[in-house]
Amino acid sequence: MDNKLHYLSMIQSVINRMASNSFLLKGWTVTLVVGLLAFANIKSMDSKYTLIALIPAIIFWILDGYFLNQERLYIKLYVKATKLKDDEDVNFSLNAKVFEKEFDWLEAIFSTTLSLFYVPIIFVILLILFFF
């Protein structure tokens, strides 16, 4: 039982790290986009600076989708590990690639949680780009 608990703890730490990475990406997205839009405002709303703000928003959205997908894979590994009967069955493998067929990276990118965060940011950037 002790091996199983240690194994579950290892998987949980990976899941926490993925969630933390996702949180940090959202913070960096807001920081960079607001900074670039402020810089564009200083330069009399120069459209090239506004357009540059799209780059970190899109790249961080894709990267955040990757972390969300990885988090889902490790949650599936965690569920599988909870069903182990004996300590002898625990192999301490953190390979979650066996579950890749169950989750799609694009599905993670366009998930509700990420879309509700990144789509409004990109919408505001495009709104500023085309109307100001």
Image (cartoon, rainbow, N blue to C red):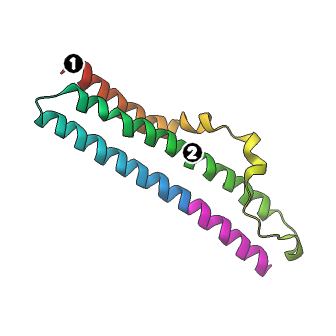
* Residue 117 rendering spot, x and y as whole percentages: 41, 39
User: Label 2 sits on what residue type?
Assistant: Tyr
Q: Dot 2, how many residues are within 10 Å of its Cα: few (below 14), some (14-19), or many (20+)?
A: some
Residue at image location 14% in from the left, 34% down from the top: 41
Crowding around mark 1 (Cα neighbors within 10 Å: few <14, some 14 to 19, many 20+) is few
Vertical arrangement, residue 35 with respect to residue 13, above or below: above
Q: Residue furthest bottom?
A: 2
The residue closer to the viewer here, 31 or 114, is 31
State the image coordinates of residue 80 (x, y, percent, origin top left). 79, 58
Q: Secondary structure at mark 2?
A: helix
Q: Could you say which quadrant of the image residue 90 lies in?
A: bottom right
Percent x, y of residue 119: 41, 31
* Quadrant position of the C terminus in the picture: top left
Give the amino acid at mark 1. Answer: Phe
The residue that label 2 is drawn on is 66
Provide the major secondary structure of the magenta segment.
Answer: helix
The answer to which of 33 and 103 lies nearer the viewer is 33
| First in sequence: mark 1 vs mark 2 | 2
The label shown at residue 85 is none
Name the residue at 64% across, 49% down: 72
Distance of label 1 from label 2 (alpha carbons) = 32 Å
Q: Residue at x 60, y 67 (%)?
A: 13
**On the rendered structure, is 6 left or right of 56?**
right
The number of callouts visible is 2
Contact (CB < 8 A) between labels 1 and 2?
A: no
Tell me where the magenta segment starts and ends, as one range: 1-16
Instruction: Name the residue furthest front.
Output: 48
Magenta-span inclusion, residue 14: yes
Left or right: 27 in relation to 18: left
Instruction: Left or right? Give the position of 28 relative to 96.
Output: left
4 part of magenta stretch: yes
Can you tell which mark lies on residue 131? Answer: 1
